[in-house]
Amino acid sequence: MATKRIGLYPGTFDPPTLGHLDIVKRALKLVDQLVIGVGTGTGKNPLFSFEERADMWRHEATLLTKDDGTIDVQPFGDSLQVDFARQVGANIVVRGLRAMSDFEYEFQIVGMNQRLAPDIETVFLMADPKYLSIASKLVKEVAMLGGNVSPFLTPYVAEKLVHRCNEKRKKA
């Protein structure tokens, strides 16, 4: 009997972009179950709470899993990535790459993770060229300045982001 292949896709996802969704869709072709580990992101001062980001992923996951695989959204707090992978039973960590700067950062992490957990493989998926320029940080800046974020997000996430940015602008 084949072992169930469980993948972990960790990140802050503040907010989840079309690039993130593309990585999830492609990762589902490689694993039987994908755990989206939503980081608390406290060091990054996220615009959305962990709960809001997890809810966005849960909404998107229902649309993504109609055909293949299963997605589980779980909190990923202040623990090592490999420890969290073991906790959820993942034998694969999925990471998306957009540019060389992503690679340099991820290369350092994978080297450390291989030393800590040689039984867990890291798989890099290159971003689809149409998503190369999408970064959550930049999308938030566009939204804060009143720009159109619909090319970068699903309608559900875009509505949440625009609403949050409008709230922040009113307070300022």
Image (cartoon, rainbow, N blue to C red):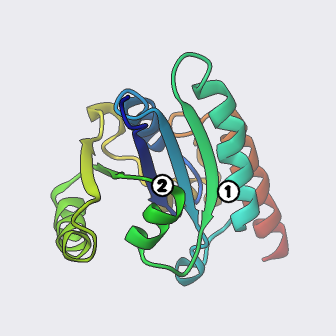
Locate residue 114 relative to residue 157 in the image: left or right.
Answer: left
Residue 16: horizontal and vertical position, in percent? 56, 49
Quarter placement of the N terminus: top left
**Residue pictured at 76% horizontal, 59% vertical:** 164
Residue at image location 58% in from the left, 27% down from the top: 64
Question: Disc 2 to disc 1, how far (Cα)?
Answer: 22 Å
Quadrant, the C terminus: bottom right
Amino acid type at image mark 1: Arg
**Residue reaching furthest front?**
1
The answer to whether residue 80 is left or right of residue 55 is: left
| Rendered image quadrant of residue 171 | bottom right
Residue denoted by label 2:
89
Which quadrant of the figure has residue 4? top left
Secondary structure at badge 2 equals loop
**Foreground residue among 156 and 32:** 32
Which circle's residue, 2 or 1, is located before the other in the chain? Answer: 1
**Which residue is at the front of the view, 32 or 135?**
32
Answer above or below: position of 81 versus 27. Answer: below
Q: Element at badge 1?
A: helix
Q: Nearer the viewer, residue 133 or 172?
A: 133
Count residues near mark 1 (Cα–Cα under 10 Å), then give few for <14, some for 14-19, many for 20+.
Answer: many
Q: Which residue is mark 1?
A: 53
